[in-house]
Structures are given as C-alpha cells and as structure tokens.
Image: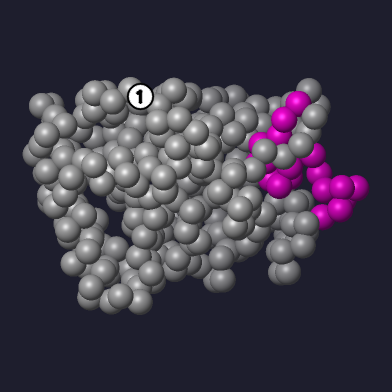
Amino acid sequence: MHPQSAVLSDGKPFADFVTFTLDNGADFTEFSQRVAAIKQLIEQVKQQDPECDLTWLMAFSDHGWPLLFTHEKPDQLVPFTEMEEAERHFPATAGDILLVIKSTRMDLNFQIAKGAAQILAGIATVIEDVQGYSYLKNRDMIDFVDGTENPVQEARNSAVLISEGDYQAGCYITVQRYVHNLVKWNKLAVPQQEKVIGRSKQDDIEMSKAEKPAYAHVNKGKSTDDQGKEIPMYRQNMPYGNAMEHGAYFIGFAKSPEVVNIALRKMIYADEQGHYDKLLDYTKAKTGVIFFAPPQSFIDNLS
C-alpha cells in the first residue's frame, strides 16, 4: 500500500489547495467517473513538463465521506472542533473534498485546479482556492523560516502514515488558513519578534531553554505527550496572498488528527501561568477542517 503522491513529498515552490463542498445529489458512481477524468487531466498536464515534479492528493472530510462512499469511514475522521478563548478563535468551517497540487510550475497547478473545478461542476462547488508559493527561501510572511523541524525520510513515514488496517498508508490532514496582521507584527522590534517565535530571525537558530519564553510559538506549536515528549507531524505550510490579504496556509499531516489537535489546544488555550501562543496576537485563523487522504489504491479503484 502506498500513500498518494503529495502526502510525503517535500515542499515545492508552488502549491494549490482547493476545497470543495458537495452539491445535493452527488453520488459514488458519478463522482468516480469525474475522478477518472481528473486523473486523466493530471497526466496530460504533467506531459507538458515532465520535470515539474508534480504531486497531488485528494482527501475527504467527515461530512463528505458518507455522501460519496459506502466504505466504512476511517475511525478517527471527525469534524474539526471549534476552539475559542479571549480574542483567539479557531473556527470550524465547511469542506467536503480537498485537492492539493504541488509542483515547480504555478501555471500547471492552476490548469489542474481549474480543470478539476470544471470536471466536478454539478456535483461539487469550489468554496476556497488558495495558491501557495515559496517565499524568501522557505520563510513565512512574518519573515521567519517555517517547517524547520519537520521529520524526514522514515521518521516522516512513521509520523504520517497509518500502518495497518483497511486504510494502511492513508493519513489525516488538518487545514487552517491564517491571515496575518503584518502592520501590527512589524511594529515589534526584531528581538521581540524572536521571543514570540522562539528562534532567531536571520539564521533560524532556536533559543536556549533559558532564553525561550513559555509563550514562544516553537513551544506552543508542538504536539507533546503527557511526559512532554514531542509527537511529530509533517507540516506542509505555505505562504499565500497579495498586498491586500496574506498569511499562511497551515496543513498538518499525521496518522491521527489528535496529534494536530493537541498542538492547537496548546496554542489557543492559556496554561495555568496564563501563557498561550503569542503569535496568535498577530494572525487569525479563518478556516478549520479535518480531512482523510486514503491510500493511492483507494483513489485508483474509484476510477
């Protein structure tokens, strides 16, 4: 059993994240035929530039799965849980299907996203299309390097893929789109920004335990067990946007959605000392959905 190609692949210069909701009357037979057409489209687009390193995946939410499939739903596929405290808010939003396309060519990604929307028209509607791009050598819009501690090779496989059962090689994906307030962020001096993140801005070195504030993002953004040991996930976050609105598309891959949920709860809810992730003072989540990306064989069998 193998995962879909975009699950474990490294980040690419460009990615397109397309969220669909299903229309009334969508059914398995019709959807399967449309998936076959999307796969054919992707192969045609890849032939335009065989070196574009294009990978993709299709994933389904708790709401979308039973509308399309009679297959048993993956046992941890649940709705995203809304979280809120003080001025901080992680909303739970709509989404039945997630299509992710990654490559070295923004134009080819767009061809697939546009074509998939046309192919699925009548049974599914695009409600969000976020075009991500590499920014200043893997930096977020706040100008700090992102994804420094991602697992690699076998550690990535172990962190992300379900290892047994009917959905072996599948994984859970949590997505959130954040909008940054860079005017507010840039009022902070660099040393203050570094304390919010917990890493140096220029050379991406993590602060020592003594230097690093409890509210630092590198502390609060990690998933840990009861003993404080980190539970790894694979983040494929990407900057997105334009001069009017910009931010980060968070997309976390793990063998259980609870891995990401633990980190999100640490970020948003203040601990006994009143510490939460201070980065949330400068960015707001606008979406929140959990999807399941089944193994490649599941997608192949649809068509």
The residue labelled by disc 1 is: 73
Q: Residue furthest right?
A: 210
Question: Is residue 245 among what the camera can see?
Answer: no
Q: Residue at x 45, y 42 (%)?
A: 169
Q: Residue at x 67, y 38 (%)?
A: 231
Q: Quadrant of residue 145?
A: bottom right
- Quadrant the C terminus occupies: top left
Question: Helix, strand, or loop for circle 1?
Answer: loop
Question: Is residue 37 among what the camera can see?
Answer: yes
User: In the displayed structure, does residue 248 sit left or right of residue 119?
Assistant: right
Q: Which residues are magenta?
A: 207-226
- In this figure, what is the number of numbered marks? 1
Give yes or no for residue 210 being in the magenta stretch: yes
Q: Quadrant of residue 206?
A: bottom right
Towards the viewer: 176 or 182:
176
Instruction: Say what amino acid the circle numbered 1 marks.
Output: Lys
Place of residue 38 in the rendered image (x, y in percent of width and height, measured from the top left): 19, 53
Q: Residue at x 73, y 69 (%)?
A: 203
Give yes or no for residue 142 being in the magenta stretch: no
- Quadrant the N terminus occupies: top left
Q: In this picture, is 180 found above or below 143?
A: above
Place of residue 53 in the rendered image (x, y in percent of width and height, measured from the top left): 38, 69
* Circle 1 Cα neighbour tier, 10 Å, few/some/many (<14 / 14–19 / ≥20): some
Place of residue 211 in the rendered image (x, y in percent of width and height, measured from the top left): 87, 50
User: In the displayed structure, does residue 39 sit left or right of residue 78?
Assistant: left
Q: Main secondary structure of the magenta part?
A: loop
User: In the displayed structure, does residue 31 sit left or right of residue 9?
Assistant: left
